[in-house]
Structures are given as structure tokens and as C-alpha cells.
Image (cartoon, rainbow, N blue to C red):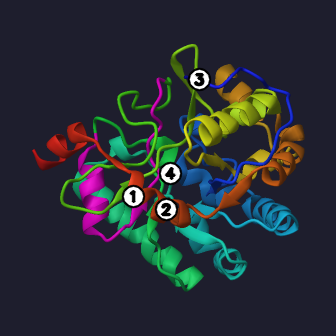
Amino acid sequence: MNAPLDFTSAGAQPAIVNGLSVDVEDWFQVGAFENVIARGEWDGISTRVEDNVSRILDLFAEADVRATFFTLGWVARRHPKLIRRIAEAGHEVASHGYDHARVFTFDRKNFAQDIRKAREIIEDCSGEAVTGYRAPSFSIDHRTPWAFAELAEQGYAYSSSVAPVVHDHYGWPEAPRFAFRPLPWSSLIELPVTTAMLGGRRVAAGGGGFFRVLPYGFSRWAIRQVNRIEGRPAVFYFHPWEVDPDQPRVAHAPLRSRFRHYTGLAKMADKLGDLVREFHWGRMDLIAHREAAHAVEFPIVAAEAAA
């Protein structure tokens, strides 16, 4: 049974701790611009990620919440003091790969090199072990079941790399909505980004552009549904560039990409402030530990990974 579609009603705070995460990449490294800003140009572009992450750290400190920062190795290499600051503030620093290449653009060998390189850089900067991974653009799907096996073999405890919805940029609609074990021989946990049920259909509700573009009440309703009706934690994400309305505009990007990237930037910080104060939040490694007992087997993944 689905929760009533009530976007505005007030209610008691849920007791469930939800997973709060930040995908640490700069404004020019996003999927929306990957075909108009080449990686070879990145070093010549003015970076804004350090100032934006600092704003987020201040917001989290004011709300007294801890989160996970899934960080590109490219960013960590150029901003090592920022990575150390994140860790010293009590947040988890996890891997987002090296330079935001989607998983399905790799074969397994090159994927292994990418996540190993990123992890070494991030651990060197943070001084802490990296146990979590999030694929750029949630790009682990039915095409890349071997990615879970590689993560497990490299010692990762959890991944949060699946969007169990239909979407033109990503998505694995057959995947479970909540924590699952993709491998029969490993304790690795996958924590999919949050979806809600509306009219019998899954809808994306875990943050990013959906959070910026839609009214805040939609996210409130979705998280309450997941917490109160499903009895499970939500997994929410956003990016540092989303709190930066003054970032440069890429005029030659496609119209759809510009709409997705720039809509709602001016209101994002205030909406995040409401979100972190209204619900209970924690690091993703904590959520993975707690969800391990509830994770289901996903036999399609197990069969394909073993093939």
C-alpha cells in the first residue's frame, strides 16, 4: 500500500536514519557536459569545487549531521587539504572513480585500474580507508555485472551505484529498490538511490536534479513514504556545484542539458537546509552496516557475474 500523496502536511520526525551523500565533482565534470567539455580541457578551467564543498561542510556542521562524500580521484589529487578537512569533520570519504567516466565505457580490466587509482589517491589524501563506491551517473546496470565482482575483489564493503528506474541517462529498472547482495560469495552490499511509488510506478526521488526542479514537498512526501510505509532508509545525493548559482554557463551545451544543470540552483541551499533539519541523516557506511541484515539476493546479478 502506498502512502497518501500529501506534499504539505506536517508530522512527527521519523526515527529512521537516512543516507546523506555528496558526489564531489566540479561544475565542468558532469554528465550533462561530457560531450561539450573534453577531459583534456579540465586543467585549464577555473575550479569551484573547494568553495562549494566548504559551504556544504558549514551547512552540515550547523545541522550537526554527518554524510558521505563520494569523491573523484581527479578532485582529490588537486585538493588534498579539502579531502583531509572532510574526513577530520567526521564525514566518510568514499570513491566516485577517477574522472567521472561511466562504468559501461570500461571493460573489467580498465574499470579495475580506474577504481584502484582513485582509491589510492583518496586514501592518501584523507588518511582513512575507503570502503564505499558510487559509479559516476549511477552507471552500474545490466551491462556491467562484473563491476560488483571487481569491487568485491578489491575489498569494498558497499556500493551505491544503481538507480532502479527508467531514465534516459541511466537506470536499471529491474533492480531491487532497497539494499541487495549482488554476489552469492561476497558480503558486498548495494544501496540503490531512493525511489518512491506513485500510482503503482517507481519514480526517482533520491536527490540531484529531481530535488532541484521539483517542489520540496515532493521530496518530503517521498522520504516519508520510504521511512514510514516501507520502514527503510532513504538514500539521498547531490553535488557541490548544485549550491553554486554563480557558476559559469555553458552556452553551447544542448538545451536539455542546460535545463537539467541550471534549474533551481538559486534555491538549492535553502532546500538542503530544510532537508537536513527535517529528517535524520547519517553516513552511507553506517546505512550499509544497518541494511546488511535486510539486504535481499538479486539472482540475476549473481548469475551474470558468475558467467
Residue 165 in magenta? Answer: yes
Closer to viewer: mark 3 or mark 4: 3
- The amino acid type found where label 4 is placed reads His
Q: Is residue 129 above or below residue 161?
A: below
- Contact (Cβ within 8 Å) of mark 3 with mark 2: no
Closer to viewer: mark 2 or mark 4: 2
Residue 87 in magenta? Answer: no
For label 4, the residue is 100
The circle drawn on residue 2 is 3
The residue under the point 40% across, 70% down is: 117
The residue under the point 50% across, 58% down is: 96
**Residue 244 in the image: x percent, y percent?**
83, 48
User: Mark 3 or mark 2: which comes first in sequence?
Assistant: 3
Q: Depth check: 120 or 300 in front?
A: 300
- Where, quadrant-wise, is the C terminus in this rendering? top left
- Where, quadrant-wise, is the N terminus in this rendering? top right
- The amino acid type found where label 2 is placed reads Arg
- Contact (Cβ within 8 Å) of mark 2 with mark 1: yes
